Amino acid sequence: MVPGAVYSHEDAPNNPTDAAKMGKTPYQEAIGSLMYASVATRPNITFTVSTLLQFLKNPGITHWEAVKRTFRYLSGTKAYQLTYGAESNDLIGYTDADGANQEHRCTISGNVFLIDGGVVSWSSRKQELVTLSTAEAKYVAATHAAKEAIWLRKLILELFPVPATPMPLYCDNQAALALASVDNYHAHTKHIDVQYHFIRDVIKKGSISLIYCSTEDMTADTLTKPLPKWKTTLHNLSLGLHRICRGVAELAPPETEEGCHSNVEHPEAQGLAYASSA
């Protein structure tokens, strides 16, 4: 998506000519194809797809151009696949939220969970309430991420019985961390529904550990807003999306003239990660 781009229902066809033109475009079919990709192996387009889904009933030319832009992006990055093994770590999570910059004025929550340098679960969705501050928005997003973290943690403990330790969940807002860690009354937060204080109990029981990280390192940022190209590329690598050549991804990618990474015959010497077949 173009950074700063805003799509609304006002972009819908406002004359018979545009309406007839849009009636011939396979907008719904295209969105269905993009949904399949975003759910299966391309978390980096999830925010775009969830945004364009809002206009299925009456899409406009602007929305159709955004869909075609997304397909061009996928075509240009079709050599990138989800990979695992770039790092060696247990389940870790990132949670983020973006301010109400869309016409519905609701915050977008995003979260990702990674194992061994590759994402295994991701989400980008509109919050069901209008929040009054950034801290509140990220607090609510952290609560939703905590619910997903608990389920993933239980699943992993069933598959790989290891000592249960708090799962690190990273957030880039100090106020949200303080609100989740300390059960205190404050005039600016007394209106928050009780259900969103669930994360306090989860932290107290030791299921997750909410940790601060800088905005620059927030991997879930790509699931909440359009980003410039350099930042999108950076977060793609953080998600585990690497360029694949001959089934192998090089983590520090010097490229040959043929567009493939060099020395792929010796992955153990190059620090390579193998791609998922999904």
Image (cartoon, grey):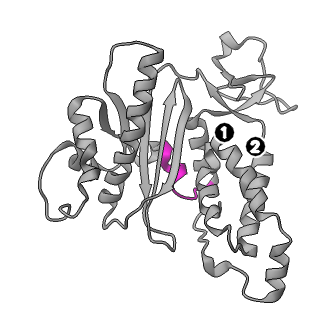
In this rendering, would 42 be left or right of 21? left
- Mark 2 falls on what kind of element? loop
Asked if residue 108 lies in the magenta stretch, the reply is no
- Mark 1 falls on what kind of element? helix
Q: Quadrant of the C terminus?
A: top right
Q: Residue furthest left?
A: 185
Q: Residue at x 65, y 63 (%)?
A: 52
Q: Mark 1 points at which residue?
A: 40
Q: Residue furthest bottom?
A: 15
The quadrant holding residue 182 is top left
The percent coordinates of residue 54 (x first, y second) are 61, 66
Where residue 77 is drawn, which disc sits there?
A: 2
In this rendering, would 186 be left or right of 214? left
Mark-to-mark CA distance, 2 and 1: 15 Å
Q: Residue at x 61, y 41 (%)?
A: 236
Residue stretch in magenta = 219-228
Where residue 207 is drawn, which disc sits there?
A: none
The percent coordinates of residue 248 (x first, y second) are 73, 22
Q: Which residue is drawn at 58% across and 58% down?
A: 226
Sort mark 2 into few (<14), some (14-19) or many (20+) by Cα contacts within 10 Å: few
